[in-house]
Structure formats: structure tokens, C-alpha cells
Image (cartoon, rainbow, N blue to C red):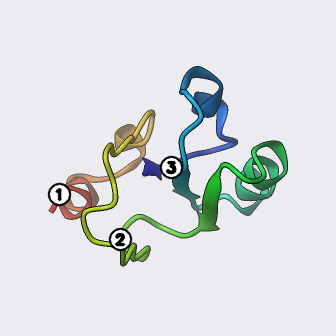
Amino acid sequence: MDIGCGTGDILHSLPHVRDVGFDINEKFIATVKRRFKGRGEFVCAEAQEYTFCEQNSVDIFLATGVLNHLDDSACTKLFL
């Protein structure tokens, strides 16, 4: 799961994995959907609003370049 996936650049560095990415920028989500069609699910949503229902199906959580954009309260909610 890629929290704040942006345009999906990290996917160039990962093996062929199914990514679940979300970001608050609609243009970024449109770009990642176009660039990496078939590599996962990409949603325009805030971290605290997004619900991923499949329990135990996420192996790794990424939050690259995201925490510096959040206040302490939002960071705490993100990791609880």
C-alpha cells in the first residue's frame, strides 16, 4: 500500500507487484492510473478517509515523502 503515491514513480523501482496507492491530488491519481494501468488500484483520497477492507492482504506500507506534509495528529492517526 502506497500512502501518498503521487504519480507512482516508486513502481519503477519495485518488482511487478499489485499496488494499492492513494493520494489527495486528482491529477497525480490520473497520471498513475495511466502510467501503471493493471498494476493495482489507485484512489484519490486522504489517508484517514481511505478504507482498505481486505485484512491481512497488505505486505508493505509505503509513505515516501508524505509525513512532512502532515501534522503530528494526522501522522499518529495514519499509523494506528
Q: Of the residues tagged 3 and 1, which is closer to the observer?
A: 3
Outermost residue to the top? 13
- The one nearer the camera, 79 or 74, is 79
Measuring 39% from the left and 73% from the top, which residue is drawn there? 52
Amino acid, disc 2: Gln
Residue 64 on image: x %, y %: 43, 34
* Label whose residue precedes the other's in the sequence (1 or 2): 2
Where residue 31 sits in the image (x, y, percent)? 80, 49
Q: Which residue is mark 3?
A: 4
Q: Amino acid at mark 1?
A: Thr
Residue under circle 1?
Answer: 76
- Cα separation between marks 1 and 2: 10 Å
Residue at point 62% right, 44% down?
6
42, 80: nearer the viewer: 42
Name the image quarter holding residue 44: bottom right
Marks 3 and 2 sit apart, C-alpha to C-alpha, by 12 Å
The tag earlier along the polypeptide, 3 or 1, is 3
What SS does tag 2 mark?
Answer: loop
* Quadrant placement of the C terminus: bottom left
Disc assigned to residue 48: 2
Question: Quick check: 13 left or right of 60?
Answer: right
Q: Position of residue 9 (x, y in %)?
A: 65, 31
Q: Earlier in the sequence, mark 3 or mark 2?
A: 3
Label 2 crowd (10 A; few <14 / some 14-19 / many >=20): few
Q: Marks 2 and 1: in contact by CB < 8 Å?
A: no
